[in-house]
Amino acid sequence: MLEKKKNIKILTVALILNALFSFQPLAQKETANWILCPNSLLNFNNPTPTFNYDSALPFNTWESSASISDSNGNLLFYTDGDTVRGSNGTILPNGEDVSYVKSVDLQSTTQGALFIQKPNSANLYYLFSLGFYQDRFDKGLFSYSVIDKNLNGGLGSVVSKNNHLCLDTLAEKMTATKHCNGKDYWIVVVKCIATKLNDGAPIEYLTEFQSYLLTENGVQISPIKSTLKTHCGRFGQMKFNNKGNELAFAQNNYLTLLAFDKSSGKVSLKTERNLPLKNGYGLEYAPNDSIIYINQLQYEIASNSLTQLNDPNYLAQLQRGIDGKIYSIRVTDEGGGFSSASIPFYWTQSNWGNSYFIGSPDNSTNLVAIENPNLAGLSCQYSANYLVANTISFSWSVALPNFPSFYFNHPISEFTYSGTCVGETFQFSLVNNPVPDSVHWIFHDTGYEVTSLGASFTFPSSGEWEVSCFVYINGVVTSSTQCVNVCGVNDVSFPDKINLCEVPTPFELNGLNTCTANYLWNTGDTTAAITILKEGIYTLETTNSCGIHKYTVEVFKGDDCTVLTEIPNIITVNNDQTNDNFSIKVKNAKSFTYSIVNRWGNLITLGEITVPPTSVFDWSTFDLWDGKTERGEIVNDGTYFYIIEFVLFNDSKFSKNGFVFVVN
């Protein structure tokens, strides 16, 4: 959240040009239209982007912004995350309060909105919204809506909204990348956690990354969670690189780089480093993924080096365009820690609240440029007066539309394949029909490589296999990697027998497999999973395009469903190393608590013991009491009473009580 103060001066829009190559990735046009502020459209359908003033395009936001166009560059929808408008600027039917019935503040969320087309759907789009919960500003609300573009005369209509995914201490960061299968998507948000190891310890900050999977069946509401010890700034952008296997964000004076597993959705820490900044906010990768731009800094990943751009101003949000350039709002704040600049400005008050937008002094828009962002250091050729747009009258916010990097990543090496089952010969071919110098295919973990325009391969077993393609043209190489899912007839893994004593009851038998189309249990259920409550023989028949297979599981109750114990009834506390302690032997318990009292009911001692997992079903000995008080004094001779509460491996509980006689 950038603070809305009158001393923030929005001066201009900066753009960072892509390096010129002998060929460029093939760009789609889903990101062709940017609604930058009220009545202002930046259009990328021509070789040079153009500004257009359109009074039919109202838009009031401070930070949160998203738009989506079709593959031909025709605007479909735009939003601040809470109100969805169509290409003509009107609010879509059911398109207000889509986040969660006005419970959140999205307009001041850095990445508060994100559009993604539903996999394998020509007409459905998902809008993900992220914002601060108004009643609790330490909370962030993450939700989604569904839009059908075919309704409302082709302008679109919201068919589902207020779908709540998470209300927690979420940061203002939201981005997405493709699953390694090339079809599904991961949407990633960030939870900030402040914790103390104990009362006297300093606060320790943790970051929980939540990866939500979007498939043709919808959003999987249980995210993949990765908790790391990193700095977690609330505001600022988080971006994937163009390959989708690296994630970066800046917060305060830190830059964090993370590895992302596109198959599992797991996040792991690569590195963190200090930045000479007070307010890390805007961030974007260069087209070749070797450089990251953070505000007005250029960070070269391989050398771990920083370069200050030749501009004293503060670059806010950064966003790549389909022309390969990176755009940013340039600001200065004389009181909030940003650099100041002696450039004239004026204020215009918006028609909502007390927030202010700023335009340039002559109602024109000056575009500054780094002409070669793939080049490190000053070789990037920063140009402060690259382009002046047509003179129009509008005002600015700091919001740029939030686009995932996969919209811009259509490399020459992008490939597709045909094939489903183990034993089939899979066929691989390039999507964009280039005329390369050579093409190199690698089938990982198989030892097979081939140099040819296309490739054929028979995988040795079912499962997920990684395939990479390298395309060489004029000495330049581009690469793409996909996960290929190879189906088998019997891809479900079940044990032959399950002991009820060794699993929590009830438990779930799950036959889910991405290749399986139909399920039939002997219970009559046709779902992938069933809940088991009792002993019996359970069978599952799975049917997919590769064939039919039947699985059988025997669920039984063994003799280890009862805790076995050996507990003495007398101890002699005389330091002769024989029977000095109240020691018990236990089998089949994973943990237990105990307490010992005297004959008047006064507590003598208590404790809790966790049995090592490898020893649960073996006899183990534990010393519970040495016959002394908590002050180390030997107790008087007499009878003492114990209560022991055991927890079995299947989480059922068993209690045992009795007495022990102490003799000194």
Image (spheres, rainbow, N blue to C red):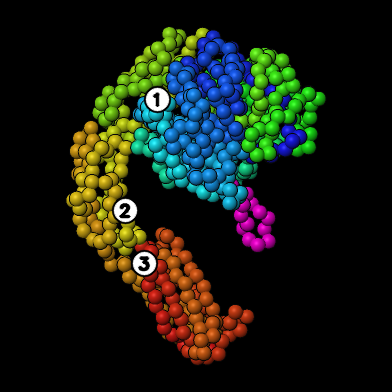
Which of 109/654 is in front? 109
Foreground residue among 386 and 145: 145
Mark 2 highlights which residue?
Answer: 508
Helix, strand or loop at mark 2: strand
> What span is colored magenta in the figure?
188-205
Circle 1 sits on which residue? Answer: 154
In the image: residue 70, left or right of residue 34: left
If you read the primary sequence from the N terminus, does the residue marked by circle 2 or circle 3 appear first? 2
Q: Amino acid at mark 3?
A: Ser
Type of the residue with mark 2 = Glu
Residue positioned 32% across, 70% down in the render: 562
Was residue 195 drawn as part of the magenta stretch in this picture? yes
Front position among marks 1 and 3: 1
* Mark 3 Cα-neighbour bin, 10 Å: few <14, some 14–19, many ≥20: some
Work out whether residue 101 can be spotted. yes
Badge 2: residue crowd in 10 Å (few <14, some 14–19, many ≥20): few
Mark drawn on residue 652: 3
Badge number at residue 231: none
In the figure, is residue 454 to the left or right of 68? left
Quadrant where the N terminus is found in the figure: top right
Q: Which image quadrant for residue 449? A: top left
